Amino acid sequence: MPPTPRWGITLPLSGPLPAQRDLVAALPGLGYTDAWSSEVNGADAFTPLALAAGWAPELRLGTAIAGIYNRGPALLAMNAATVAALAPGRFVLGIGVSSPVVVTAWNGVPLERPYQRARDMLRFLRPALAGEKVSMTGDTFSVSGFRLATPPDPPPALALAALRPQMVALAAALADGAITNWLAPSDVPTVRAVAGPSCELIARIFVCPTPDAETARQIGRRLIASYLTVPAYAAFHDWLGRGPRLRPMQQAWAAGDRKAALAAIDDKLVDELVVHGPPGYCRERVAEYQASGLDTPVIAIVPAPGVDEAGAVRQLAPA
């Protein structure tokens, strides 16, 4: 368990990254302890954190996640070493498989043997980031004689995106933390039981801070349909016990009937998986995750009409 309560935010927000400097600099004073990047089709995972390292030197920084297929092992180690040197002792390299759309449809890389790829990458990164010369033959790649020219001191912690028991157990065995998302507070004990007491649990929590429940639920339905039809997320929720509830939505989506898929998502499901309501209520809901055993909640602001993202960051701060 981390020594102090943590409260994270996802960076960057929408809009130009340089314009977010003042807000990022204010985060520690607002009570935020962490800033975690994401990587889909906007900013890459590392550049926002490199800027944040100088803008807010008190924050712990993390990638959630840097993909392990779109970068080779040596390049990923170099990316991590660069940010770790900018934020000594304050950087967590979070890695993960990503999705078939990002990996294959957008980057032309076959997404094969994800568990083995994650295991190989963790086995490579730990000694490489410690400055060792690494030669290894894994199940999914080989490395011959790589050594970082300037290894970071100290090396960054490692975290692995994990949505199913086997990946959670791998994170507990070879990394320092497990990263998940799209779960309710009631799901945290299930993940914790596999991770064990010493593996840090980090989760991105989608928060739509608006009192307009109907609008928030409409937005939440679109997010749920786009994420929980991905095979890894579908399997995750099968494990958590939501498989039967999600099956009609997934079947309609697979048939190409997007309208029916959205209609199959009931309000209760949205309310479980997307935090929405006035900011004070949203803070209380995020705190429920911590009370259930989550170490590091990472708020991801879901834009809605009338919601100012920078203002929402301030309103959702724990202080």
Image (cartoon, rainbow, N blue to C red):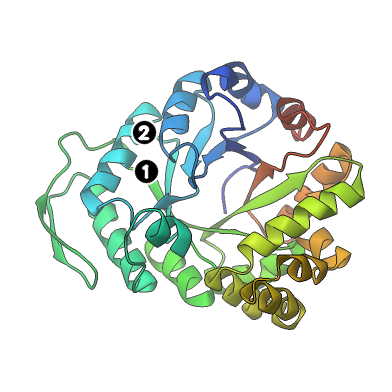
Q: Secondary structure at mark 1?
A: loop
Q: Which residue lies at the image location 45% right of the left edge and 26% below the top edge?
A: 53
Q: Which residue is mark 2?
A: 83
Relative to 189, residue 54 above or below = above
**Is 69 left, or right, of 318 in this rendering?**
left
Q: Are marks 1 and 2 in contact (CB under 8 Å)?
A: yes
Which numbered dot is residue 156? 1
Which quarter shows the N terminus? bottom right
**Is 170 left, or right, of 217 in this rendering?**
left
Relative to 211, residue 127 above or below = below
Q: Position of residue 52 (x, y in %)?
A: 49, 26
Which is nearer the N-term, disc 1 or disc 2?
2
Relative to 145, residue 100 above or below = below
**Is 317 left, or right, of 89 in this rendering?**
right
Which numbered dot is residue 218? none
**Type of the residue with mark 1:** Pro
Relative to 315, residue 175 above or below = below
**Type of the residue with mark 2:** Val
Task: Please identify the quarter of the rendering in which residue 244 is found.
Answer: bottom right
Label 1, label 2: how many angstroms apart (C-alpha)? 9 Å
Q: Residue furthest front?
A: 256
